[in-house]
Amino acid sequence: MPDYETHEYDVLVIGAGGAGLRAAIEASAQGARTALVCKSLLGKAHTVMAEGGIAAALGNVYEQDNWQVHFRDTMRGGKMLNNWRMAQLHAQEAPDRVHELENWGALFDRTADGRILQRDFGGHRYARLAHVGDRTGLEMIRTLQQHAVHNGIDVFMECTISRLLKDGDRVSGAIGYWRESGKVIVFNAKAVVLATGGVGKAFKITSNSWEYTGDGHSLAYWAGADLIDMECVQFHPTGMVWPPSVRGILVTEGVRGDGGTLTNSDGVQFMFNYITPYFASETADTIEEAERWYDDKRNNRRTPNLLPRDEVARAINSEVKAGRGSPHGGVFLDIASRRSAEYIRRRLPSMYHQFKQLADVDITATAMEVGPTMHYIMGGVRVDADTAQSTVPGLFAAGECAGGMHGANRLGGNSLSDLLVFGRRAGLGAAEYAGNLRATPKLDQEALDGVVKEMFSPFDHGSAAENPYTIQHELQDTMHTLVGIIRNKSELDEAMVQVRGYQERAQRAGVEGHRQYNPGWHLSIDLKSMLTVSEAIARAAETRKESRGGHTRDDYPDPSPEWGKVNVVVRQGPGGDMRISTEPLPQMPADLQALFEEAH
């Protein structure tokens, strides 16, 4: 392979966010020769945008908190669609992962007696989020990055992986290109860990940055792995809606956790009108019990503004559709009237500076305009809970590109602890798998050459080429309008027709110039991933004929007991076509099931 830069490793980790860094650290600690590949610069991972905190039942603020309560909250938040074993391991191991991070140098906010401080977040029964102001993700990445570099892990920055390679049924490595030069790079590896994040750039309004094009989801799918729960997409209730230049940027749930309230154009705290449907079905038997549970006057720690994200997002959507929204199509989030300016600047420094510098809004003096923004996908690669291995031997996944942990809806704060818990397990599983192989799997030269030919094809289309930016823009409009926060069969069917049309056009996506510094070429490659995950989301959403968590159908507005027992599974058929099926959820053992029968 004289034209390809080649490297050989035991474990290749694709993605350098919290999950990827933690996986690489663990694999290296087990003695595996480990490489870390990131699409952008090291330290630029989307994890840095996670502001609120790390959910872990440390019990530092409320000593009655424990892993069982955290497990129960996670399952209820996910509308019981979660892989119970993943939720159990997450709740049990999250405290150790937080303390581990602290031992590696992370600096957390503190209680008066010096313990790690924890704040409230939506869907969590107790104050549970360990935090560093509203910059927790940044502190996590700083700590993990320094630990990884200190351990001597090889890092390949600004390198995009285009395909995984296989030797028979098992993974043998990956092929990609350097973004700066366009030169091909090949990794021969015994095991591969996917930690590439989400799919947000397939949607018009998103909190996600440019890297989130569904790479891990599509790489796994093309390699033959199962995807699950792709219909479950989380729209964070509070993204910025004004000015347009910052539309979609996240306003941390910590604003509401620290006392912020949501109001409509009439000045009404409308979330009180939406507590009953959630709590009557989930944690309370009567309206009166639900109202007592969320009585802000008796217990300031709990407000209806901290319902799970899917509930708040739908409530905001309902207020806007009813004509009670803010001037720019959102609602108001007010913390200025609830907390002092000094408190806001100390507890929410990033939010203060973000609004002041980007929107010229002083959140210590006025309310913010916020609305739902595509934020997270609960669906992803189906993995074994204990090892994080996918259905393809040698292929592992962790973080947002892995499915199962969060069910139909992720609770805020569970993402960062998910990265730590399953990033570690993926690294450990990959190292153990690699250690059991005597030799590195072989690379298929014919397959390599085929991928390279496909990568370079956009330069060959000439005057008949389609513009990749136009295709992405139209795809984003389709996903936002037809596969967004509220769905129905006719719109989903139309979305699938449109996506298939974009897929045909993407085959003709063309660019001019050469491979060096050519963002149009990069997008033409990313389009294949975005279109694959978009089809998976739309088809899975059409299949699940109920409303559950982040998946809402106005033609099937209620949850269904039957659909609550199955995953929607997406896999590639023998001819390359997408196949959709349903399979039963893993059966929860009786001792864990009993937790949901206890008095609230």
Image (cartoon, grey):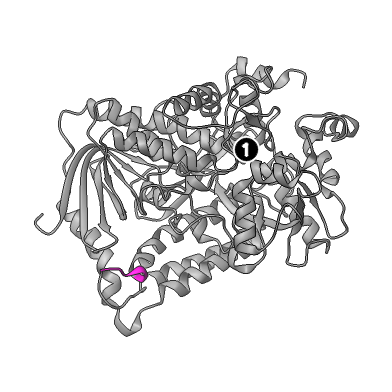
Q: Residue at x 25, y 69 (%)?
A: 515
> Above or below — where is 585 with respect to 311?
above
Identify the residue position indicated by label 1 in the image. 411
Residue type, mark 1 in image: Leu
Pick the front one: 137 or 18? 137
Pick the front one: 112 or 504? 112
Please provide percent x and percent y for residue 28: 28, 30
Q: Residue furthest top?
A: 591
Q: Which residues are magenta?
A: 516-520
Pick the front one: 565 or 341? 341
Which quadrant, please, contains the N terminus?
bottom left
Drawn side of residue 243 relative to residue 165, left or right? right
Please provide percent x and percent y for residue 346: 65, 42
Residue 519 on the magenta span:
yes
Secondary structure, mark 1, is loop
> Above or below — where is 361 with respect to 227?
below
Q: Residue at x 40, y 69 (%)?
A: 506
Quarter of the image where one finds residue 276? top right
Residue 325 on the magenta span:
no
Does residue 356 appear in the picture of this structure?
Answer: yes
Which quadrant, please, contains the C terminus?
top right
Q: Residue at x 30, y 78 (%)?
A: 512
Does residue 569 appear in the picture of this structure?
Answer: no
Please provide percent x and percent y for residue 415: 54, 38
